[in-house]
Image (cartoon, helix red, strand yellow):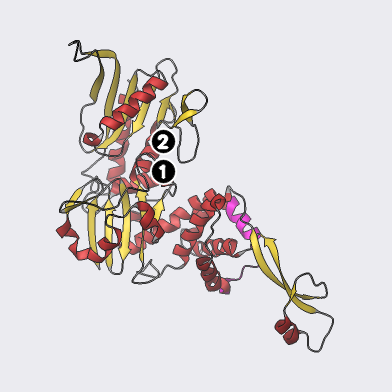
Amino acid sequence: MKVLRVKDNSVNKKESFEEISKLVCKIADKTLEQVGNEGIFIFPESIGNAEDITEEQMILQSTNNSYRTGNVMGFLGFGDERLIIESRFGQEGNDYFMEYLLARVLDIPNLVDMKSEADQDQKLFNFFLFLFPYYLKAAMRKGVFKSYICCKYNDGNVKGSIDIARHIARNTPFTGNIAYSKREFSYDNDVMELIRHTIEFIKRKPYGNNLLAKVKDDVKLVVDATSKFEPYDRQRIIESNKKSPIRHAYFREYLMLQRLCLLILQHREHQVGTGMRQIYGILFDGAWLWEEYINTLIENAFYHPMNKGGKGAQWLFAGNYGLIYPDFISKDSQKRIIADAKYKPVDNIGNKDYLQMLAYMFRFEARSGYYIYPEAENSEDLFLYLNKGLTYEKNVARREDVNIIKRGLKIPSAAEDYEEFLIMMHRSEGEFITRLGR
């Protein structure tokens, strides 16, 4: 197997990708929307609503003789080629930081410590399994999925189309029954059956019951709705769902769950894709993970509008004009602070970011704004004071009452194992929160 590891937000020579050239041809200079349509699972799915990652962003973007990576992290495979995009804080093949973000934000356990195969395909498959409760809960918020199904009957109450061949086979000599079929709007359909098969599959895993316990109410609804469930019917259900993906926009969450279930149920040892020519994998939005992680640290002191969920929407102008979603707005109305979580390197936080922050500060009458970013070293906070005056009038001077602060959170880089990383990370979080409260 050919495996290449690269870091997010990095530039790598094209020569280093020669060993996985077939995979690179599939993803290079293609947008996330394009690769998503080819079978790659992108999390979270509503990337079109994000500011730091968009459908136009690329996994690998050509720049002269190099490929540039962005805020995306994850695993990709094609045939016997693998590409692993780690966080830039990963060390010696162990990406403890990415594992930590997934554990804090998505409640996915540290996969390094799981008793499973060491290969990346198995690790990828475990990601799919641990994402299942998240997507099940998201889909079930829309209620149990209901659709038309074809039901076959053989009785004297004809209410549909008569099945001549089946009638002759079953009712000769005639006993008063007639074989017929009709379409009915039912909860027990192929989509719900697919979800049920996935639930039963996960239950057989050593950690399955603990995993499903997080969504036990949703699991019960699925079980109650699928009274016709039969274990031997799994392959037919898989093929039916592959041929008929959910298309209605209202049930987009069910479409993502349907895709995830198919990935789980079609898993084969050492091969997650459905064939050697199938590209597959999972990508995580590092910017979104970082923002949600920061929220777990400061949620008691800050409001957190969420553009992906459409919660806490704010408007620039009266009459609901200029929709905006600041990352964080402090709850202290007397000393309002705007905070923006930035996963990208601090040197990449530039002009457009400044303009956006100042607009938010003006809108919410805040005198201070924070950029919160991950860093590898304990750097001092960078204070940026707003200017006043004009160069034309030669009276430019800084304002002491309005500033933007770039404040980093130290990510451990010398941990020998995940347990030591946790200790060091908790220490960094404590120091960061202390500085933030000053």
Q: Quadrant of residue 387?
A: top left
**Dot 1: element:** helix
Image height of 358 relative to 415, above or below: above
Q: Quadrant of the N terminus?
A: bottom left
Residue in the picture at 62% in, 63% down: 189
Q: Is residue 215 visible?
A: no
Residue 86 location in percent, x, y? 27, 51
Front residue of 345/58: it is 58
Image coords of residue 398 (percent x, y):
23, 14
Residue 415 as seen in the image, left or right of residue 107:
left
| Label 2–label 1 contact, CB within 8 A | yes
The residue lying toward the viewer, choosing from 143 and 325, is: 325
Q: Nearer the viewer, residue 150 or 89?
A: 150
Give the labeled residue for mark 1: 105
Identified by mark 1, the residue type is: Val
Q: Which residue bears the numbered disc 2?
A: 296
Number of other residues with Cα within 10 Å of mark 1, as a class: few under 14, some 14 to 19, many 20 or more = some
Residue furthest bottom as drawn:
173
* Place of residue 127 in the rendered image (x, y in percent of width and height, measured from the top left): 40, 56
- Does residue 271 belong to the magenta stretch? no
Circle 2: residue type: Thr
Q: Is residue 80 left or right of residue 259?
A: left
Chain part drawn in magenta: 217-232
Quadrant of the image containing the C terminus: top left
**Marks 2 and 1, how far apart at CA:** 8 Å
Q: What residue lies at 24% left-to-right and 26% top-to-bottom?
A: 381
**Residue 221 within the magenta-colored segment of the rendering:** yes
User: Is residue 415 visible to us here?
Assistant: yes
